[in-house]
Amino acid sequence: MASFGIKAQPARGIAAALALGVCLLSGSALADPSPEERAAARQMFTEGKELEKQKSWAEALEKFRKVGAIKMTPQVRFHIALCEENVGHLVAAINGFELAAEEARSAGQSAAEVADNAPARAEALRKRVAMLRLSISGKQISSKIVLDGSPLGKAAQDVPIPLDPGDHVIEVQDASGASTFKKELRVAEAGSESVEITFADVEPAPTTSG
């Protein structure tokens, strides 16, 4: 999958969010974890920041995820999303920034910088994601649509689907798991793809009792 970096980094708001994360991790945010876990989280958060400065986004992402497993805060979630953005996981980054903003608003002044900056970053990414539109005909009974290995619910089939730029595979599988349709896609940033899918499912034979 393609990787997209930010050329000017970090901005003032992001730097402030970094500082807030340190404050929150060193204070009451990690009240539930043990002292050892708190110390480990502070160390990993610091290491994550250093990796961000080096633009080692994948390594930083791993650090922040480990911090979040100990105690998730709006600041930690913000940095997870920032790293997701820079390794090309734009859809995950949008979700992360939006959730960070929501959590920051609930947290109040301690996470004000995240609440101020996360929505703008999510909005900027929405302009960069690709969109997949499915044109579906026929009767779907037992078959399922699978996108990049994950089944799509019927509700998701009726709306445009955001995709990270890069390579994707869309497939139709029957009740036995056999592939009845497969298409490989390569979508550009802010691109759009349409795929036509025709189902040919057959109603199961009625059972008789006797």
Image: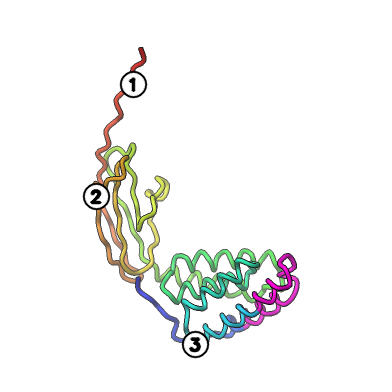
Q: Are marks 2 and 1 in contact (CB under 8 Å)?
A: no
The amino acid beneath tag 2 is: Phe
The amino acid beneath tag 3 is: Gln
In terms of image quadrants, where is residue 191? bottom left
Which residue lies at the image location 47% right of the left edge and 84% below the top edge? 55
Label at residue 181 = 2
**Which residue bears the numbered disc 1?**
207
Which residue lies at the image location 35% right of the left edge and 55% below the top edge? 147
Considering the whole magenta stretch, tell me its main secondary structure. Answer: helix
State which tag comes first along the sequence, 2 or 1. 2
The amino acid beneath tag 1 is: Thr
Which residue lies at the image location 35% right of the left edge and 69% below the top edge? 165
* Span shown in magenta: 16-42
Is residue 28 within the magenta segment? yes
**Which residue bears the numbered disc 3?**
54
**Quick one: label 1, few (<14), some, or many (20+) residues within 10 Å?**
few
Q: Looking at the picture, how far across and down is residue 183, in whole percent?
A: 25, 56
Q: Are marks 3 and 1 in contact (CB under 8 Å)?
A: no
Q: Nearer the viewer, residue 59 or 197?
A: 59
Label at residue 10 = none
**Quick one: label 2, few (<14), some, or many (20+) residues within 10 Å?**
some
Q: Please, what secondary structure does the residue beneath circle 1 have?
A: loop
